[in-house]
């Protein structure tokens, strides 16, 4: 089994993943290195999984401002 696969029920909350995304952007100063970009992409997938398993809109993540409408940082557009 791949070490990156999580067991069912072990998904972190959207709020925790959102906080990690915000911290990554804060540390980067708005420009992600290749390593940070890879981490960001992984966090996006994890965040989407957490939002998808959060249940109804009245969950704790929604109250914390981490629901689908409160994503930490919009995806970065490719530089020209």
Image (cartoon, grey):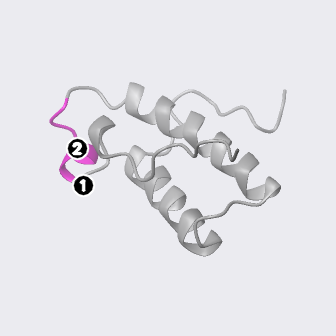
Above/below status of 30 relative to 50: below
- Against 11, is 63 above or below? below
**Tag 2 near tag 1, CB within 8 Å:** yes
In this view, the residue in front, 37 or 43, is 37
Dot 1 alpha-carbon crowd within 10 angstroms: few under 14, some 14 to 19, many 20 or more:
few
Rendering quarter of residue 34: bottom right
Residue at image point 56% right, 27% down: 8
Q: Is residue 8 left or right of residue 32?
A: left
Residue 76 horizontal/vertical position (percent): 57, 46
The structure residue drawn at horizontal position 58% and vertical position 34%, both measured from the top left corner, is 45
Q: Is residue 78 above or below residue 65?
A: above
Dot 1 lies on which element?
A: loop
User: Which residue is at the front of the view, 58 or 29?
Assistant: 29
Q: Which residues are magenta?
A: 57-63
- The residue at which mark 1 appears reads as 64
Q: Is residue 26 magenta?
A: no
Pick the residue in front: 48 or 4: 48
Residue pointed to by mark 2: 62
Instruction: Indicate the quadrant containing the N terminus: top left, top right, bottom left or bottom right.
Output: top right
Quadrant in which the C terminus appears: top right
Indicate the position of residue 59 as horizontal and vertical percent values.
21, 39
């Amino acid at each position: 089994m791949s070490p990156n696969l999580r067991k069912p029920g072990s998904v972190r909350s959207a709020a925790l993943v959102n906080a990690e995304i915000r911290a990554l952007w804060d540390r980067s100063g708005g420009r992600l290195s290749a390593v940070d970009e890879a981490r960001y992409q992984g966090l996006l997938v994890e965040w989407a999984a957490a939002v998808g398993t959060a249940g109804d809109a009245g969950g704790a993540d929604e109250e914390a401002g981490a629901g689908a409408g409160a994503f930490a940082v919009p995806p970065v557009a490719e530089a020209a």
